[in-house]
């Protein structure tokens, strides 16, 4: 039987897969690694993926997998995403076309949880502003007055792998941690680890700081908007290491201007520099441009884990499959939704 054709679209090309996995892949598949700085458009994607049985890609290099492109790719039977989150993909459409999807749910958990804690500490201590002021990058009269976190209430929205790790780190700081999740299995696991849980409104009412770790699903509306922000105690802190769209940015900036929020930190770039540039200059909004996962250990771990999942997909025995046309007993499904890489 002819070996399947596997096309890889990543910025690092061949280096995105560790050496051992690459050798194994070359023995059982025709592997074409295409280094790219960005995702191809529809025409280019159809050319690159013509004849592909499997596609491996990072989110940054993944083309828009809509009906029109899938019509051009009749052989495609699976996508292996070098990422945790897949909310930009229409899983129902993929399933209807017999195209599988597998992901990396746990390759960056610690890194993103540590980023969440770093962002919370930055908002509380105004560390980022102290650095800017020492370099003459902001008004020397800018206040560096912060708050202590120990003894305050921390609310975690989303109790998956990252959320539970964030809760552990918050406890290590001496915070009183509670959480919420619409997924009852995730909430049950959190309670089994001693975490108090409840509904979203209950959590917001009691939280001096909130960290958003919830998964995003296709076309989902924000979880936190004007109403939810109005439930927080005055001068609360909000951190978002999930999808930026889970927080209504306009509502968050309005809450900062009204004093409801003391600060908002997001692992993305969301502010309009013209309309809300002052909030960034004042340090009340902190943006880290989706860098939370970018760690030495994550890159090494990801190269190995992605290679393992690519190899499993080649053998039609997917690991961490969101959907796959022909699962067997060794396929391990993951919940709908997920955080981004």
Image (cartoon, helix red, strand yellow):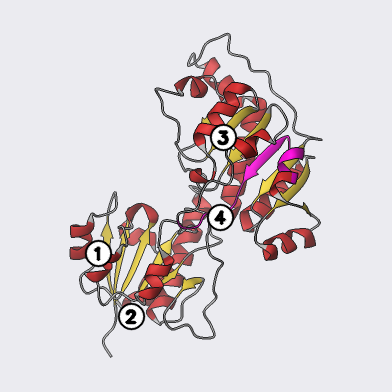
- Sort mark 1 into few (<14), some (14-19) or many (20+) by Cα contacts within 10 Å: few
For marks 1 and 2, give the CA distance: 33 Å
Q: Which residues are magenta?
A: 202-218
Residue at the far front: name it.
227
Mark before the other along the chain sequence, 3 or 1: 1
Residue at 73% over, 31% down: 233
Q: Secondary structure at mark 1?
A: helix
- Residue 130 colored magenta? no
Q: Secondary structure at mark 4?
A: loop
Mark before the other along the chain sequence, 3 or 2: 2
Q: Secondary structure at mark 3?
A: strand
Mark before the other along the chain sequence, 4 or 2: 2
Mark before the other along the chain sequence, 4 or 1: 1
Residue at 53% over, 82% down: 330
For marks 3 and 2, give the CA distance: 46 Å
For marks 4 and 2, give the CA distance: 36 Å
User: Residue 57 at what x, y percent from top left?
Assistant: 36, 61
**In the depicted structure, whether residue 249 falls above or below residue 163:** above
- Sort mark 2 into few (<14), some (14-19) or many (20+) by Cα contacts within 10 Å: few
Q: Nearer the viewer, mark 3 or mark 2?
A: 3
Residue at the far top: name it.
141
User: Residue 114 at what x, y percent from top left?
Assistant: 61, 45
- Residue 209 colored magenta? yes
């Amino acid at each position: 039987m002819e070996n399947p054709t596997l096309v890889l679209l990543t910025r690092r090309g061949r280096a995105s897969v560790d050496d051992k996995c690459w050798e194994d892949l070359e023995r059982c598949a025709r592997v074409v690694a295409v280094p790219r700085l960005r995702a191809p458009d529809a025409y280019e994607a159809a050319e690159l993926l013509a004849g592909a049985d499997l596609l491996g890609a990072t989110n940054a290099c993944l083309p828009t997998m809509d009906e029109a492109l899938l019509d051009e790719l009749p052989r495609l039977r699976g996508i292996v995403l070098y990422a945790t989150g897949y909310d930009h993909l229409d899983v129902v459409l993929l399933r209807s076309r017999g195209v599988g999807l597998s992901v990396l749910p746990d390759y960056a958990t610690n890194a993103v949880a540590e980023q969440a804690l770093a962002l919370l500490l930055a908002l509380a201590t105004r560390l980022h502003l102290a650095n800017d002021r020492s370099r003459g990058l902001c008004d020397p009269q800018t206040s560096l007055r912060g708050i202590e976190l120990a003894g305050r209430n921390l609310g975690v929205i989303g109790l998956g792998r990252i959320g539970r790790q964030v809760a552990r780190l918050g406890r290590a700081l001496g915070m009183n941690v509670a959480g919420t999740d619409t997924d009852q299995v995730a909430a049950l696991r959190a309670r089994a680890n001693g975490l108090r849980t409840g509904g979203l409104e209950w959590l917001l009412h009691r939280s001096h700081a909130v960290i958003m770790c919830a998964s995003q699903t296709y076309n989902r509306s924000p979880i936190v908007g004007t109403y939810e922000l109005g439930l927080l105690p005055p001068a609360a802190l909000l951190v978002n290491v999930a999808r930026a769209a889970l927080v209504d940015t306009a509502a968050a900036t309005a809450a900062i201007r009204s004093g409801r929020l003391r600060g908002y930190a997001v692992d993305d770039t969301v502010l309009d520099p013209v309309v809300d540039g002052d909030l960034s200059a004042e340090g009340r909004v902190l943006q880290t441009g989706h860098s939370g996962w970018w760690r030495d250990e994550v890159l090494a771990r990801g190269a190995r884990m992605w290679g393992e999942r690519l190899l499993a997909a080649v053998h039609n025995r997917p690991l961490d499959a969101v959907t796959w046309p022909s699962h067997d007993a060794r396929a391990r499904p993951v919940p709908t939704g997920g955080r981004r890489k």
